[in-house]
Image (spheres, grey):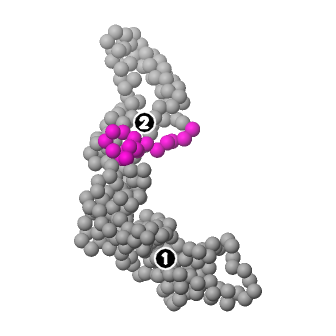
Amino acid sequence: MRFYYMSIFSLVFIAVIYAVAIFLASKLLGKKFKGIVAWVVIAAILIAPWTEELWIAYNFGQLCRKDAGIFINKTVEVDGFYDSTMRSAYENTKPGRYRFVEHATEDRHGFERVQRATEEERLRALAWYAEKNLGKERPKDRSIFQPLNEKETIAVLPNGVDAWRVTKLDKPTARYHFLKDQGIQLTHKVGRQMSKVVDSKSDQELARYTTYYRGPYWFFIGLDRPNMGCDGPDGGPNSKHPNSFLIYRDVLLPMDKK
């Protein structure tokens, strides 16, 4: 079982509940509240508030032992991939990483492929901006964007060194996809979140990372409600992978090491 955190406020609250419940039981039962009857009633009062916690803790513990953690079926060398979880392309296409990454557009209404621009493309974009803004210095706090056509743009960061070619897409074209759900409720106050890497061509699952999470018992009182989850059978987040939520790094190996 995986029990939720206990707080001093919860202990005080449950103590008050016990005291009131035992007092009321003694008054309602009167002279009958003694001997074996009293012990049975007191035992029922002590256990009753914890029945929800016992149910949650049992289900949570069973699920953690079932399949929580990282499972890698296959690793592959790739030029790039589609990241459905975040806009990671600019970070993931730096030198020594992937040649391209596809992700959602900034407005989340479309898709785009991001890849490092060539040195020639970078210089042309800087020259284009200088020509369009004669006598003005290049902005130090924002990128410049040179449109090449309706779908392609060269983006140069404020440092003038890092540049990317950004291509609008109707849908992801990369073969390998990194996916993550938003979490689903499985039983009372117990849910699951899963991320995985799939081969969209063969529909094969290359890797999966599963975490389970649970909510607090009904009488929990605290300054906050800390998350409680597991990503392995031994309790608590215990993955040996420091970036387990980015499992594609263990599965999709960049071809471009330069």
Please provide percent x and percent y for residue 69.
33, 49
Residue 91 visible, this angle:
yes
Please provide percent x and percent y for residue 205.
27, 63
The residue carrying mark 2 is: 4
**Residue located at (56% from left, 86% from top):** 147
**Residue located at (38% from left, 50% from top):** 241
Looking at the image, residue 207 sits to the left or right of residue 33; the answer is left
**Residue located at (69% from left, 76% from top):** 139
Near mark 1 (Cα within 10 A), the count class, few <14, some 14-19 or many ≥20, is many
Residue 189 visible, this angle:
no
The residue carrying mark 1 is: 116
106 or 59: which is nearer to us? 106
| Mark 2 residue element | loop
Q: Which segment is the magenta one?
A: 223-240
| Mark 1 residue element | strand
Residue 227's tag is none
